[in-house]
Image (spheres, rainbow, N blue to C red):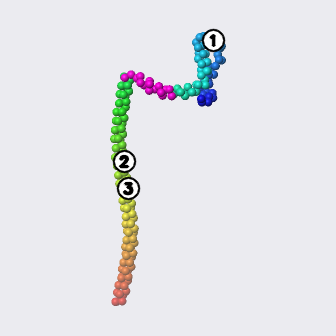
Amino acid sequence: MPAPISSGQFPSVDRLIELASDKDDPGAANPKEAREKSMWKLLLQLRPFLPYLARLVPKLDVAVGPLQSAGISSDVRKAVAQSMAESAANLQSIQRGLHTATSALDRQSAQLKALEDELARLQQASEKAAAAQLSLSNDLRSLTRLIQIAGLGGIALLIALIVMAAILLAHIR
């Protein structure tokens, strides 16, 4: 037999027993009060078993549940069956809607992926164009510098030619 459970483990049971104790008026002549007192005395005698009974009640509820449902009338069964059929139909329509939404989401995801790829290609093309433009700009600066140097050289040669022609004309006279 299991060890007795201390009274501190179930304070609500102790409170009930305390309320039922003989602190009431001992001279109660009412038969209803006497019957209630005898019930409390019975509870006091059953006090050691109350924790076990408290644990047993939920187990009895689980065991008695199927027996209670066996007594359900056929109308209730039909209503429950119809409700379950409607629930199943609703669930199937929700699943179809979910499948449709999922496929639409997959299509949108594929479109987004294609847009991301296109954006990456455009970004690469933009970077290449920027690099080509920078290279062209550098080439133009170099060409401008070369033309400036050639122009200065041409001017220097023209000046030298004019000076030589002046010297030659001066010698001829």
Pick the front one: 52 or 153: 52
* Nearest-to-viewer mark from 1 and 3: 1
Q: Tell me if residue 9 can be seen.
A: no
Picture coordinates of residue 131, whole percent (x, y): 39, 63
Determine the secondary structure under disc 3.
helix
Task: Give the crowd class for mark 1: few <14, some 14-19, many >=20 residues within 10 Å.
Answer: few
Find residue 109 and name its label.
2
Q: Left or right: 9 with respect to 161?
A: right
Which residue sits furthest top? 29
For mark 1, what is the residue?
Answer: 28
Give the amino acid type for the residue marked by disc 1 in the picture.
Ala
Pick the front one: 127 or 159: 127
- For marks 3 and 2, the one nearer the N-term is 2
Looking at the image, do the residues carrying marks 2 and 1 touch, with CB atoms under 8 Å apart? no
Determine the secondary structure under disc 1.
loop
* Main secondary structure along the magenta-highlighted residues: helix
Q: Which residues are magenta?
A: 59-74
Pick the front one: 128 or 78: 78
**In the picture, residue 128 is in which quadrant?**
bottom left
Picture coordinates of residue 106, whole percent (x, y): 35, 46
Q: Residue at x 34, y 41 (%)?
A: 100
Q: CA distance from mark 3 to mark 2?
A: 16 Å
Picture coordinates of residue 25, whole percent (x, y): 65, 14
